[in-house]
Amino acid sequence: MASKRIGKQTVKIESPVSIAATAAIAGPKEGDGPLRLYFDMIIEDEMWGEKSWEKAESKIVKETFSRLLSKADKTTGEIDYVIAGDLLNQCIAANFGLRDSEIPFFGVFGACSTIAESMQLGTMLIDGGYADNVVALTSSHFCSAEKQFRFPLELGTQRPPTSQWTVTGSGAVLLTNQGSGPYITYLTTGKIVDMGIKDANNMGAAMAPAAVDTIATHFKDTGLPIDYYDLIVTGDLGLVGKTICADLLKRHGFDISDRYNDCGVMIFDCKRQDVHSGGSGCACSATVFAGFIYQEMMKGNLNRVLFVPTGALMSTTSTQQGESIPAIAHAVSVERDLSS
Amino acid sequence: MASKRIGKQTVKIESPVSIAATAAIAGPKEGDGPLRLYFDMIIEDEMWGEKSWEKAESKIVKETFSRLLSKADKTTGEIDYVIAGDLLNQCIAANFGLRDSEIPFFGVFGACSTIAESMQLGTMLIDGGYADNVVALTSSHFCSAEKQFRFPLELGTQRPPTSQWTVTGSGAVLLTNQGSGPYITYLTTGKIVDMGIKDANNMGAAMAPAAVDTIATHFKDTGLPIDYYDLIVTGDLGLVGKTICADLLKRHGFDISDRYNDCGVMIFDCKRQDVHSGGSGCACSATVFAGFIYQEMMKGNLNRVLFVPTGALMSTTSTQQGESIPAIAHAVSVERDLSS
């Protein structure tokens, strides 16, 4: 086993890899939610002046990337790699949104876990000495996702109580070897977990076992106590999946309930905003991290966070062919102050 | 700039990262082509006993992965990461084909350049000390790709002369820090290049400028002479794109024509097999590398190869909305003998 590996799935990052800046752009519904004050920008409508939802999503990606660089006072020439992906077929939101960036590009697909995958790869590329600055970015869009994965919006199809609302927006993180924190300290990379759930309107239940597997593995690999973290936050399990995740972890001997939340639950006021089980989509955990979590860390209100975005690795074709839903979750430890 | 970076887009790998083994499974048409003797297995029909083309593609992935481990005499427990992707929406061939592997998983999407992206990331994860063994794997399938990207096969739609034939198959590479070559020595990561080509039946023309950009950058970054390599081989430009690529490179002062070939041209006997401009798909460069190139290196017939898979980063939605085709190419240097 390589020297930086601790346990089967975890890497300990010894050099200081910092998050120099984050940027988050959100849609109108997210901008009406409890985290509204944490976003850099809230777009007024889902089209944002474009001719299609997909073009609007690419524009959100492009603008989020541009805001990130301007907040960090960096030029594109200073960025060594961009690692990005999204939910659209062939990841076109990222590909088109970043096509003018002129930066070495790695496209990734981890469904709604994508921001964690890109942050993990980016952290290793910096810690390994291959890059000074890496951007990790993802996006999703309610309308382009509904159109692609479910039903035409114009049908007004009723949504079951377990369903989640895809977040419109994009979140981006600038990783660097030159910053002063928050630092990335551990990476636990998930395995694909498929417990046989087939209901594409109950992603929380499909993804919860993957989150459980990764969180339990993280604590086994690192030997850290649960109260090492101020906050353990899963990707987008929503209300249904969050309960399953906490219960399953408790059964495995990990009671995280007094410091646990879920980005899908946090981003919306679920009852008032009528989003049923909560938010989802690549942008859900990405905007909650780039907005709320990062800013609360910078203010000193959070010191150590275990960030565990979750993804459902299915497509409409696999669902139509009767397949169950494989899921994955990746954990990233972020710490404000390494001396404490 | 980090110490291992040379130039803007290239990394020099100083530690010995070897390719311990490769595996390639190909479809019946590929098995009737000039490289037939280099594949580990040729499946008899495109369904391979499954109920859908997508399930058949996942089975090809699963079997290729299993063959790779058995050829290298490795267990899944010895593999630190799998990095894989494919052309299907949400990369379901890789996600379903590898869902039982129990290995930390990074999903990637670089269209037909995916095998190079996964080899680049895998090489840096090993060289950086995060892994001992990494599997890079991709797949594609003629029928699942035609169904998804073009027309129902049952229509018998006529294909234009510039079109390419998606390769059915999967290619996999086991990267390790414990082997004795062939070694991976340089990685040049591509930028997204979009020259405005809109014809989804002329991918070679759309991708050629990306290959030109990456190959020219590779030689500028490394300062190596063109004759450093025995073979410079692009991903799947096909006959049309190959000619454009060689011509454009010559205009930029890089005459590679006496040592240049393209995986899309190599995998089929284009005229006899009626594939028009040649092969394409994630499996095209992956099976040509895992089959022909790797075996010829092991025999001593090739010593230094610059492997440059190319990808077209569009979707049917982007094409239908009138967008042009962004493309990318990543270069990986593979050398049999480091002492020469």
Image (spheres, coloured by chain):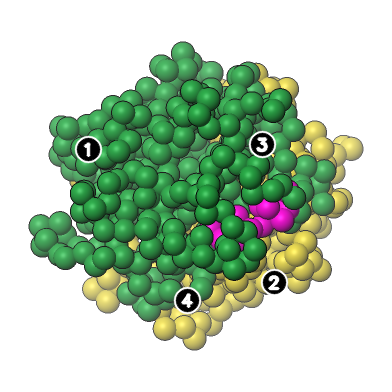
Chain colours: A yellow, B green
Q: How crowded is mark 3: few (under 14 residues within 10 Å), some or many (20 or more)?
A: many
> Is A30 situated left or right of B48 in this image?
right
- Asked if residue B216 lies in the magenta stretch, the reply is yes
Q: Where is residue B321 in the image (x, y as percent from the top left)?
A: 36, 77
| Chain of the residue on which disc 1 is drawn | B
> Is B276 situated left or right of B281 in this image?
left
- Asked if residue B268 lies in the magenta stretch, the reply is no
Q: Mark 3 points at which residue?
A: B185
What amino acid type should be assigned to the residue bearing mark 2? Arg
Q: Where is residue B313 in the image (x, y as percent from the top left)?
A: 45, 61
What amino acid type should be assigned to the residue bearing mark 3? Thr
- Residue beneath the point at 10% across and 62% down: B155
Q: Residue furthest top?
A: B73
Magenta span: B211-222
What amino acid type should be assigned to the residue bearing mark 1? Asp
Pointer 1 with pointer 4, Cβ within 8 A:
no
